[in-house]
Image: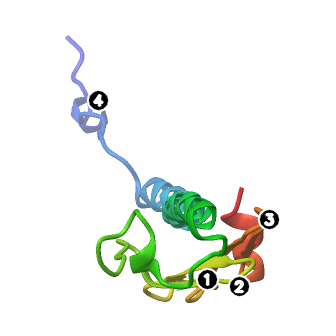
Amino acid sequence: MKLKTWRALKRPQAGFTLIELLVVVLIIGILAAIAVPQYFKVVEKGRAAEALAAIDVIRGAQERYLLKTGFYTATASLLDVFSAAPTFKNFSTLAMGGGSTYSVGLTRAVSVQGYGNYIVQKLANGNLSCSNASCVSDLLP
C-alpha cells in the first residue's frame, strides 16, 4: 500500500484570482462608459420627438386658423388645440410668431448635458431648426 502525500490529499482550489476579477470589472466599466452616453442620447432624441409632434399639432392648428382668418396668430389660446396655455412634459416655453408667416418653437425645460437648454423650432415652410449644433445632428430627423 502506497501512502499518499500531502499534496495528493489537498483538493484543488475553486474560484477566481484577483486578476481575473479585476479584468471582468474593467470590461464592465468600459462597456458602461460606452453605453451610458448612448442611452442618454436615445432618451433625449425621444424628448425631441415629443417636441416635434407637439409642433406638428400646432402647425396644423395654425393652418386652420389661417383658413378662417387670413393670417397666423401668435397667441396659443386662439388655436383650436389649446383651451389654456399649453404645457409640455419636457418643454417649458412655447413661442409663436404670427402675421403673414409664423414659427413655432419649444424650449427644453431643463438643461441637458451636451445640449443645454435647446430650442426646437419649425417655420411655416416646414424647415426645422435647433439652437444647438449638436442638437441638429443628434436629435432632429
Mark number, residue 125: 3
**Which three-letter amino acid code belongs to the residue tagged 1?**
Ile
- Report if the CB atoms under discs 4 and 3 are less than 8 Å apart: no
Q: Residue at x 62, y 60 (%)?
A: 67
Q: Nearer the N terminus, badge 4 or badge 1? A: 4
Mark number, residue 119: 1
Residue 2, image quadrant: top left
The location of residue 93, given as percent across then percent down, is: 46, 86
Q: Quadrant of the C terminus?
A: bottom right
The location of residue 98, given as percent across then percent down, is: 64, 83
Provide the residue designation for mark 2. 131
Q: Residue at x 49, y 63 (%)?
A: 54
Q: Residue at x 52, y 67 (%)?
A: 51
Mark 4–mark 1 distance (CA, rounded to whole Å): 74 Å
Q: Nearer the N terminus, badge 1 or badge 2? A: 1
Classify 88 as above or below 80. below
Furthest-front residue in this view: 69
**Which three-letter amino acid code belongs to the residue tagged 2?**
Ser
Q: Quadrant of the N terminus?
A: top left
- Report if the CB atoms under discs 1 and 2 are less than 8 Å apart: yes
**Which three-letter amino acid code belongs to the residue tagged 4?**
Ala
Mark 4–mark 2 distance (CA, rounded to whole Å): 74 Å
Q: Do we see residue 49 in this rendering?
A: yes
Residue 119, image quadrant: bottom right
**Which three-letter amino acid code belongs to the residue tagged 3?**
Asn
User: Which numbered disc, 4 or 1, marks the residue closer to the eye?
Assistant: 1
Provide the residue designation for mark 4. 8
The location of residue 17, given as percent across then percent down, is: 40, 54
